[in-house]
Amino acid sequence: MSNPHSAADRREQDIHAGQASYSKGLLTIYDFMVLGLSCRFAWGCTKTEIMRNYQSALGARHLEIGAGTGYFPDKARFPVPRPEITLLDLNPKTLAFSSRRLARLQPRTVQANALDQLSSWQGVSAGGFDSVALNLLLHCIPGTIAEKADVIFANVAKAGRSGARVAGSTVLAKGVPVSRAARALIRDYNKRGSFHNADDSVGDLKLMLGKHFAEHTLTVRGCMALFSAVVP
């Protein structure tokens, strides 16, 4: 007899397994290895292009979903001297690493799963942000784009005030140019469980952006999608 909870349990296990790979050692070399090398030479999109898209969205009250190393908020120019930054991530190690890096900005940290409902994100209020970013996040989360982006974009739209700007990026596997090297890495990372994007397509991403944001743009660079949107 099949277990009705098995699929949900596997999804939860995949989520925790994927974020667990971000150890202190990996975070120390992440900027060089991932943002410096992988983005440029495998995915075909430089960190400068990601930063340009990110920079265009920033507001005084900012929510960063997927804290990573804190590279982008660290290097960016916010429109006010003392922005209110909230870092949200499931992994306490990335929250600790990024918050130390951004200590001068005194960010608030929230440990939460991006796939959970906004109401469960302790300290994150609906309509409380001028900008929301989710860089290099979707390809790490289990599920199809239609499943994961639907939930996350709904949360983003609730978290941002009307008119808030959204910026993000993700590695796609379908409907975009994927080099031989990129395809090999995507296959390997999916096997390891650090990526979950084997079926992520540009078409599905466009559909989800259109569902949640009337005003949005999507640009493809190599096999990476850069997207921006405005909260209705």
Image (cartoon, rainbow, N blue to C red):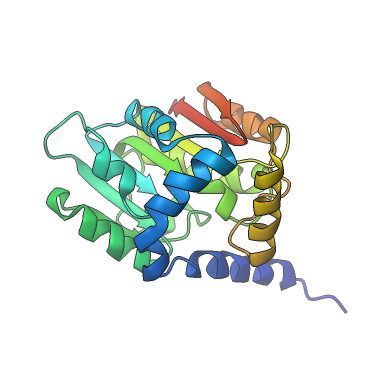
State the residue at coordinates (46%, 28%).
228
State the residue at coordinates (58%, 49%).
139
**Residue 60 percent location from the top left of the image:** 22, 34
* Quadrant assignment, res 205: top right
Q: Nearer the viewer, residue 161 or 95?
A: 95
* Quadrant assignment, res 165: top left
Query: Can residue 154 be seen?
Result: no
**Residue 16 percent location from the top left of the image:** 54, 69
User: Residue 119 vs residue 13: left or right?
Assistant: left
* Quadrant assignment, res 187: bottom right
Q: Quadrant of the N terminus?
A: bottom right
**Residue 21 percent location from the top left of the image:** 50, 68
Q: Nearer the viewer, residue 103 or 46?
A: 46
Q: Nearer the viewer, residue 146 or 51?
A: 51
Among all residues in the image, which is located at the extreme bottom? 1
Q: Quadrant of the C terminus?
A: top left
**Residue 34 percent location from the top left of the image:** 47, 50
